[in-house]
């Protein structure tokens, strides 16, 4: 994928990533709903990596690449943190319970999994890669 940016792990860079994805996808005439859903999913994963995996350590970086092939938008997000997300340990939150108790947080990956067609996480040593896929035609 040729379209790429590298950002430091600072939450202020979330806007940089949102703008990068939005600008890239502008050429594909998506509805506002689909565009905003994709941006939300990407924002959630990047925020998790910046805040939870890299503890907002600005000496750490994320590489973000985007592309479209055969009407499928793909985004690849890489980091080299010691923390990695393990999908096998993920438990879908009880949204009704969250609402009932007023709990904030903990539903981001549930949103990502609902919005995107496919979500993949791989780790080799400290090198982590998240790939998100969404059919856009």
Image (cartoon, rainbow, N blue to C red):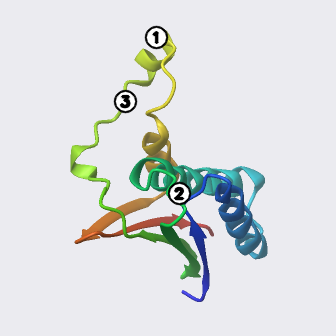
Q: Is residue 75 visible?
A: no
Taking depth in this image into account, of 9 and 99 the one nearest to the observer is 9
Residue annotated with mark 1: 101
Rendered location of residue 124, percent (x, y): 24, 73
Mark on residue 93? 3
Q: Quadrant location of residue 70?
A: bottom right
Decide if residue 55 is on the left or right side of residue 40: left
CB under 8 Å between callouts 3 and 1?
A: no
Q: Secondary structure at mark 3?
A: loop
User: Looking at the picture, does residue 99 appear above or below residue 19?
Assistant: above
Q: Secondary structure at mark 1?
A: helix
Crowding at label 1, few (<14), some or many (≥20) Cα neighbours within 10 Å? few
Q: Is residue 45 visible?
A: yes
Mark on residue 110? none
Rendered location of residue 121, percent (x, y): 33, 63
Crowding at label 3, few (<14), some or many (≥20) Cα neighbours within 10 Å? few
Please tell me whether mark 2 or mark 1 is closer to you in this view.
Answer: 2
Q: Earlier in the sequence, mark 3 or mark 1?
A: 3
Image quarter hosting the N terminus: bottom right
Decide if residue 52 is on the left or right side of residue 34: left
Taking depth in this image into account, of 79 and 96 the one nearest to the observer is 79
Decide if residue 1 is on the left or right side of residue 109: right
Q: Earlier in the sequence, mark 2 or mark 3?
A: 2
User: Residue at 32% of width from left, 54% of height from top?
Assistant: 85
């Amino acid at each position: 994928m040729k379209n790429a940016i590298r950002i430091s792990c600072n939450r202020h860079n979330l806007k940089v990533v949102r703008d990068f994805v939005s600008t890239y996808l502008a050429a594909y005439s998506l509805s506002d709903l689909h565009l905003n859903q994709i941006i939300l999913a990407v924002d959630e994963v990047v925020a998790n990596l910046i805040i939870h995996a890299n503890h907002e350590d600005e000496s750490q970086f994320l590489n973000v690449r985007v592309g479209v092939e055969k009407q499928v938008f793909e985004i690849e997000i890489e980091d080299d943190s010691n923390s990695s997300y393990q999908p096998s340990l993920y438990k879908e939150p009880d949204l009704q319970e969250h609402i009932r108790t007023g709990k904030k947080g903990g539903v981001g990956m549930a949103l990502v999994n609902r919005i995107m067609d496919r979500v993949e996480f791989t780790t080799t040593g400290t090198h982590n890669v998240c790939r998100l896929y969404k059919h856009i035609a």
